[in-house]
Image (cartoon, rainbow, N blue to C red):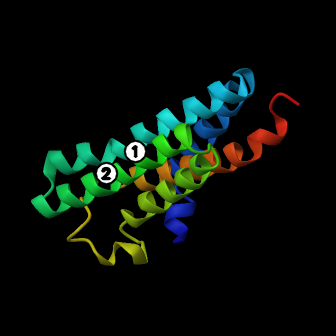
Amino acid sequence: MTNSFARSPAAAIGALLAAATIPLNLLLSRTQSEQFAAVLLAVIGAIYIGFSLQKGTRAQIATELTVATGFIAAALAGLWVTPRIVPVAWAAHGIWDYAHHQGSRLASIPSRLVAIPLWYPPFCAVADWVAAASLAAEPACLNA
């Protein structure tokens, strides 16, 4: 992770906003919390479709649609198979965000990834990783 990414004000804001959602998960029942996290995963998984439709090539649109479909499938698997998939998928979405960061080694495939606002990858990746960590820890502290 590049210093500009980790030290970005957007990354700090993402971390704070994700941390602010933790009490909500603690107020919901375990089932409701798991369902809420899965639905949000499907939504965040589809965000890049909007970016690609706005200014992407056909290849970029196809890439973003394919990856979004994977996150939606993970959300459904979290609802229908096991909720343990959801925190892993949230962490994976953070990696997908980081891949869109211009300083990322993962961005060596820029022709396949749509260009997005510079602030967005650090904001969303850090938010995803904080959410993933809280969701992974959540079963231990809910309904104890």
Q: What residue is disc 1 on?
A: 72
In front: label 1 or label 2? 1
Task: Answer with left or right where residue 50 lies relative to residue 100.
Answer: left
Please report the residue visible at 55 percent of the width from the left and 69 percent of the height from the top. Answer: 3
Please report the residue visible at 50 percent of the width from the left and 54 percent of the height from the top. Answer: 125
Q: Position of residue 18 (x, y in %)?
A: 60, 39
Q: Determine which of the numbered discs, if any, sits on residue 1 in the image.
A: none
Quadrant containing the N terminus is bottom right
Q: What residue is disc 2 on?
A: 117
Q: Amino acid at mark 2?
A: Pro
SS for tag 2? loop
Please report the residue visible at 42 percent of the width from the left and 50 percent of the height from the top. Answer: 71
Occupied quadrant, residue 19: top right
Disc 2: CA contacts within 10 A as few (<14), some (14-19) or many (>=20): few
- Residue 90 visible from this viewpoint: yes
Between the C-alphas of marks 1 and 2, the distance is 23 Å
